[in-house]
Amino acid sequence: MKDRSLHSSAAPDAAAVLPLFGVFLLMPPIITLFASGLDIHGVPLIVVYVFSVWIGLIVCAALLAKRLDPTHTEQAAPPEIDSDIRHR
Amino acid sequence: MLTTNVVLFISLAYVALLFAVAFAGDLRARKGGLGWLQSPVVYTLSISLYCTSWTFYGAVGSAARSGIEFITIYLGPTLVFIGWWLLLRKMVRIGRLHHITSIADMISSRYGKSGSLAALTTVIAVIVITPYIALQLKAVTISFQVISNRSADMLSGFPPAQPDFSIAFWIAAGMAFFTILFGTRNIDANERHHGVVAAIALEAVVKLVALLAVGLLVVFGMGLGADELFAGTTPPNLHNSDIFGASWITQTFLAAAAVICLPRQFQMTVVECSNEQHLRTASWMFPLYMLLICIFVMPIAIAGLNHLPAGSNPDMFVLTLPMWADQNMIALLAFLGGFSSATSMVIVSSIALSTMLSNHIIMPIALRLPGVSLDVNDDIRRFLLNSRRISIVLILLLGFLNFRLSPQSEALASIGLISFVGVAQFLPALIGGLFWRQANARGAMAGMIAGFAVWAYTLFLPSFKGAFILSESDISFGLWQQALLRPQALFGLDGLDPLVHATFWSMAINIALFVLLSLSRGQKPLERLQGTLFVDVFRTPAADASRFVNRSATRYDLNVLAQRILGPDEALQLFQKAEQRHGLIRDNSLADDAFISELERKLAGSIGAASARTMISQVVIGETISLHELMKIADATQRIRDYSHQLEQKSRQLEATAGQLKDANDQLTLLDSQKDDFLSQVSHEVRTPMTSIRSLSEILLDEQDIKDVQSKRFLHIIHEESIRMTRLLDGILDLSLLEGEKTAWPLAPIDPEITLDKAISVCQGLASTGSLLLLNGARAGLAGSNAGMVRVNADSDRLHQVFINLISNAIKYNTSDKPFVRVTSLVENDYYQVLVEDNGPGIRNDEREKIFQKFSRGWAHTRSSTQGAGLGLAISRQIMRRLGGTLELMPDTGRGACFRIKLAVYRGSVCTTLPV
């Protein structure tokens, strides 16, 4: 029980950190480390690295999105804007 | 090969399909059941509008030319979307709360609903998007020519002659027509286009499927494995770390800015967002979409480099590769994908831009012109729709002109990046406005104008290579031949890629002016209010805004206004709802401010915040923004601090009170137990003599043969015990009277020596029975100047009582062989003192205080025939206290005990009573 509540309160912080982490991984100088001439099964390392990081970020975002609810953490969002009567 | 007619037919059929989907979507929305139209997947797919024909064709081109650099265009938006919690969430919330209709609307609304800022943003947006639209036209034109080409060099990807501008013109015209049909059939109060969203979602799927099809063809259909793929000619820079420098960072930044600031992206992400929850899905699904799009870009580029003739146009590899592989169906699908991506971009961009143009430029101007008649009911709406249609045509015309005038050798990607830098000029004003309360309109305006000017000078105009405004020599050598003004080496910053150079200077100057002017100038009240509302959107509900602006207007005027803009049906609905909620009374009464604000918001949905405000202010009677209230919200922190300080004080007070209560309670408990002790002692004391009396009386009554002597003895004992009890009860009463301090004593200046002598003579009898010597020591009255002259203010009877008590105690408890008691008196330091000494057993240390307590008999080891009640010393001490003196036991001298009485010598006038 405790773990779950820890997670849900850590989610907004994780959500704030994730893009920064992405920037860190995808910008020089870190990314230049992978621009060496290595190949993985014929595919250049840099290609593998960029796509792996990309997939990783997507997965993390998906996991976080489950735990984040924009309307519950602070004051509730305004009610749904229904479609008003259309005029011609 | 595919004929022109076939391609044309397919294209038109596809457009018809899109239109059908849009129509169905609108129909469904009108019926009220939005259902799948509002699913998060549709939302995400509509955001995928970001991938236009630049992505479809240009990404491969960019990959073939410069390796993995193309991926920055997709990494930027990925970072923005996975960081939705920080930025996009706020934008969406504000958009919905304030009924924002476009990016110009948001910027103008934030900076005090400034009309001029809205107009500026609109003009910049139109100019900046022009190249982007041109690039779409170019892509469609060239792809059309390529796929319907029959000549030998069809695989070159280059059109046989110059791009056929007549084809481009008709394509532009077709797009304009389609856009007008799509987006200007009605005006939604929230500026939502549900049908368009549905159509865009469909075309996003088509786009993805087409690109994946070509990719799969390349990787599997051509029998190429991964190692073979990368073994041949590869794009440059794949193993080069040099590209990860300024260019990489700049392009990522630009792409991130674009996904926020592009009018079409803003429309899809913020304005069309019906539910904030959708953002959660979009945060990962949109990056996933882009990942899928990009996955085959590299393979396609490499395959093109390896299999197609050298010098082919890499921008067209997506189309020419299937053609080379004789896969006509896939080639057609690819063409459709490219066509689809271009049309969707043009449609949505044109709708967004035309909305901005009509709301922020045309409408405000029309309101000011006397010639325009806007009095009849439907006028305004018709006017709005027409102005939008004209705007769409204008925008597409500009796009076509841009295409016509710019050189044809440019890669698609570099054209697109020019737009990106231009649109990034909105970023400081937008982001600054969302997070910095102090940001004001002047800063935003100055920043945007300067940024735009720098962009135009360093990037946009040079892209025409001398065909437009700037001549070729201007571009090479600087305006007016000034070296410092060279468009691609401004102020001497040489050696940078033109894109990086332009981004750097435009953003630096933009941000600098924005910050400087925001800091140096104050804010107008409305700016401040909007600033706080925007920055604190997660804390302040929008309804509160009405508290700070107090306006009133007649219901009739408001009704007319609402009918003119929203239409009679909706106006009626609005007023009915308001009547239910606010309880408005019939015509001509004044509407309250909450209703006026709500109406303003509804109008803003149709004509933009600035225009809505203008129109409302024309009918409003009185308007005040209470600066006092504004200060209060700005001082929210101070309030909270004050409040917590008050709470602290209160709790301290409460603690003190609790402490006092506890002390009082403790005291009461102590008194209670003391009372219990006293009662038990008294009852014990009384029971003892009572027992003797009772039993002896019983014997006397019962026994018949009792001798006279014995009965006389018994009666004697009974008598004595009764006396003893009487004495005890008298003592208790005395003590209680003394302690109660209720009665006043008559005081008079008396000679205490006389009282002392009397007491001594009384006790002589007692002394002689025990053969005790009662001595007179030095006496104050006899010696010296005080002879017969000592006076104290006291009650002689009480003093007498005390003397007798002390002397008789000394006699009673003296058990030594040669007992004596000496009484001494003296005057010292204005105090009359009497000392009573004996040579008895003395008083043990632990009993020195106890003897003065009630019922103590101190010397437990002494037994004497006359037993007192144990109250004597207690009474004596009380009496001395009442007289203002003291009774003490002198320190132990090792032999007997000595008691001392002290009383102040009387010198003044007579005082007859002691104060009670």
Image (cartoon, rainbow, N blue to C red):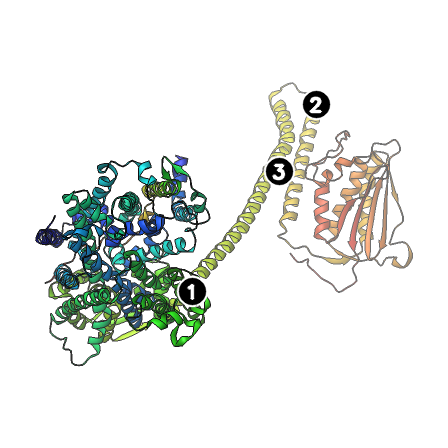
Q: Residue furthest top?
A: B705
The residue indicated by pointer 2 is B710
Q: Crowdedness of circle 3 by 10 Å Cα count: few (<14), some, many (20+)?
A: some
Place of residue B551 in the rendered image (x, y in percent of width and height, measured from the top left): 27, 71
The residue indicated by pointer 1 is B508
* Residue beneath the point at 25% across and 72% down: B552
Q: Residue furthest bottom?
A: B370
The tag earlier along the polypeptide, 3 or 2, is 3
Q: Amino acid at mark 1?
A: Ala
Place of residue B49 in the rendered image (x, y in percent of width and height, measured from the top left): 24, 53
Q: Chain of mark 1?
A: B
Q: Residue furthest right?
A: B784
Q: Secondary structure at mark 2?
A: helix
The tag earlier along the polypeptide, 2 or 1, is 1
Looking at the image, is mark 2 or mark 1 nearer the viewer?
A: 1
Q: Is residue B578 visible?
A: yes
The residue indicated by pointer 3 is B678
Q: Are marks 2 and 1 on the same chain?
A: yes
